[in-house]
Image: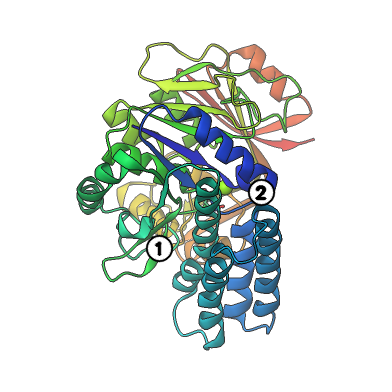
Amino acid sequence: MQVFKFGGASVKDAESIKNVAHIMANYKKDELLVVVSAMGKTTDRLSEVAQHYVDQTGQAFTYLEEVKAWHQDILAHLFHDPAHPIFDEIANCFVEVEWVLEEEPQDSYDYLYDQIVSTGEMVSSKILAAYAKHKGIPVKWVDARDYILTDNTYREAVVDWEKTEEKIRRDLPAVLDDFVIVTQGFIGSTSENFTTTLGREGSDYSAAIFASCLNAEDITIWKDVPGVLNADPKWFDHTELIPELSYTDAIELTYYGATVIHPKTIKPLQNKKIALNVRSFVNPAATGTFIRSTNQGLPVPSFIFKVNQVFVNIQPRDFSFIVEDNLSHIFNLFHSNRIKINMMHNSAISFCVAIDDTGKNIDTLLEELEKRYKVSVEKGLELITIRYFNQETIDRVLVNKQIIRELKDSYTCQLLVKKI
Ligand code: ASP
Ligand code: MG
C-alpha cells in the first residue's frame, strides 16, 4: 500500500483541492491512505484565535469568523449544490470551537491550543474526502484521533507507538481493501480522548506513522517544490534537485534545519525500509527525490540557512569547570523551556549554543541561567550548515559575513555568522 501526504500549500484554495483529487485518482496504484494538513495558513490563523481567547482580548470570535468565511468560500467553489451535507459538517466543526470560546479559559494554553487548532485538519480532511467522493473516488474519511495515540504533552505530543500500531493494524487494512482513506495529519489523541497535536509541520510525521504501522511500500510527500533541493531557493538563485538521498543524509539535513520534511519523519521509515518520495503537486509527472537506503552520498554540497539565531555563552560563576553536573542542569533548563539547540560547543570553562529567537521562552531561559552562570547573549545572527562542505562552499557563504563560531566534522560544517 501507499501513503500520500498533502501539506497546507497543496490545499490552499478550491483549484488546489481539485488538483489533489486529480492526483489521487491518477496515481492510485493499489491501496492508498491520504494524510492532509490544514488548508493554506489555517493553522497560523487558528493559533491567533487560541491566543486571543486565552488573552481574553474579546477578538477571538472575529478571528474565527474569518477562518470560517474563508473555508465557506472554498466550499462554495467546490460544491454547487447548497444542500450538500458537507456545508453542515464544516459548520458543525466550527460550532465546536465556538463552544470552547464561549467559556472562560480554565485549562492551560497548550491544551486549549490543541483543541482549537486541530479544527484546521478536521475541516480540510472532510472537504477533501467529500470532494474526492463527489468525483467518484471511493473514499472513507477516518478520524486520526482514533488511531494516533499520544501522551498529554499538548502541542508536542509523544506517540505511543505500541497502541497506535495495534489500532491501525486492527482496523485499517480491511478498510483499505475497498476505500481510499482520507485522514488528518498533525493530530492525535490521549487515552482520555483529548485532542493533541504533534508539533508544527507534524503532518509529515503522521504520514510516516501510518506508513510504518501499515508496512507501506512507499510514501509520497507532495510539495510545491520539485523535491529535495540542495538549498532553499529563498537563499540561492541556482539550486539543484537531489534525485536520490540516503535516509542518513535526509535525517542529518532535516536535523540541521532543512524544512522540506519534518525531522521526525525519516527514522520510522528507515526502520521499516519504506522509501520516501518527495515530489511536486504542481508537476505531478516529475519524479522528484527518492529517500531510501543507499550508500550514495549527496551528489552536491547542501546548504541550510537559519536566520534569527541567538548565541548564548554560559560560564559558571564560581570558576568551576563545565562538567557533567553543570551540563545536565543547563540541558534541563533548555528542555523545560522547550528550546532546541541548533549548534553547541563546550570548552573547560564555557558552554555555548545557538538557538532560534523564539521570544518569551528565551527570556525565561536566560533569567533561569543567570541565577547560576555568567551569561552573554548576541542576537540577530545566522547559522549556515553545509553538508559535504569544501573550502569553496565555505568561501561562497562567507561573503560579507564574520564568523562567530565554526564547527566541523568530516561531513558537516556549521558556521554561526554575523553580517558585516
Ligand atoms: N497544519 C499543521 C501546521 O501548519 C501541520 C502541518 O502542516 O504539517 O503546522
Ligand atoms: Mg504545513
Instruction: Work out which quarter of the rendered image holds the N terminus and state it.
Output: top left
Secondary structure beneath dot 1 equals: strand
What's the residue type where badge 2 is placed?
A: Lys
Residue 416 drawn at (x, y percent): 62, 35
> Mark 2 vs ligand 2: CB under 8 Å?
no
Q: Name the residue under label 2.
A: 12
Question: Mark 2 or mark 1, which has the lower sequence index?
Answer: 2
The location of residue 252, given as percent across then percent down, is: 45, 29
Q: Confirm whether residue 345 shows in the render.
A: no
Instruction: Please rate how many residues cluster around mark 2, counting C-alpha atoms within 10 Å: few if below 14, some from 14 to 19, many from 20.
Output: some
Quadrant in the picture for the C terminus? top right
> Between 185 and 71, which is closer to the camera in this rendering?
71
Residue type at tag 1: Thr
How far across and down, in percent of the image, does residue 207 sit?
41, 42
Judge whether 297 appears above or below 320 on screen.
above
Q: Note whether ligand 1 is within 8 Å of mark 1.
A: no
Q: Residue at x 62, y 71 (%)?
A: 49
Question: Viewer-nearest of labels 2 and 1?
Answer: 2
Q: Name the residue under label 1.
A: 196
Residue 328 % position (x, y) = 33, 53
Q: Do the residues labelled 2 and 1 touch (CB within 8 Å)?
A: no
Nearer to me, 99 or 381: 99
Rendered image quadrant of residue 211: top left
